[in-house]
Image (cartoon, grey):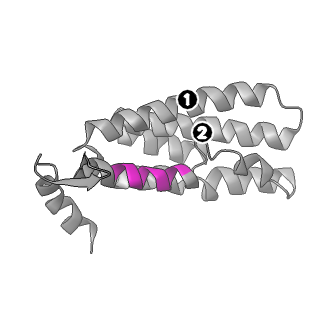
Amino acid sequence: VDFSTIFARASAFSEPHHYFIFCNMRFHAITVICILLFIGAVGKSAQIGLHTRLPDAMEGPTPVSASIHAATMVTAGVFMIARCSPLFEYSSTALIVITFVGAMTSFFAATTGILQNDLKRVIAYSTCSQLGYMIFACGISNYSVSVFHLMNHA
């Protein structure tokens, strides 16, 4: 299935009568889809809760680690959210969750990075903080700002 087909049919799932029932509770279909997509992006872009892998993964020389982690490995989650922006615009709940997680990640990673002594960990937490800013920009529906920051950060 291509993106144009998904985006064309997304409006049908934004109607109130499309929902999932789980544990006798109703969940809006497009919100569930967007939250699940966001959980995948959280794992890839080292957001709060799954951020611990990024500082521990920097095992190579410092310039190589900085280049790889800033440019390639962790940016796919932000790009996926920006690419799927027509879906996220149908769910205000998902955008609120994205905004909150991005803001918390940015603040937490910046304050944690200040307390580090190892240069590689400082770079990792700095990257994590910048990814939080990018996710936050997606959460407030500024996808072009997020992608611009993504390209400039690399």
Res. 85 in view? no
Res. 53 in view? yes
Of residues 94 and 45, the one drawn nearer to the viewer in this rendering: 94
Q: Amino acid at mark 1?
A: Met
Residue at coordinates 61% horizontally, 58% vertically from top-left?
72
Residue at coordinates 42% horizontally, 38% vertically from top-left?
98
Residue at coordinates 63% horizontally, 58% vertically from top-left?
73
Q: Quadrant of residue 131?
A: top right
Q: Which residues are magenta?
A: 34-42
In which quadrant is the N terminus drawn? Answer: bottom left
Name the disc covering residue 50, or none. Answer: none
Q: Is residue 54 left or right of residue 117?
A: left
Magenta stretch secondary structure, dominant: helix
Marks 2/1 in contact by CB < 8 Å: the verdict is yes
Helix, strand or loop for disc 2: loop
Real-space Cα separation, disc 2 to disc 1, in angstroms? 7 Å
Disc 2 residue crowd, few under 14, some 14–19, many 20+, Cα 10 Å: many
Of residues 111 and 19, the one drawn nearer to the viewer in this rendering: 19
Residue at coordinates 18% horizontally, 57% vertically from top-left?
10
Which residue position holds label 1?
104
Name the disc covering residue 48, or none. Answer: 2
Inspect the magenta stretch and tell me whether residue 117 lies in it: no
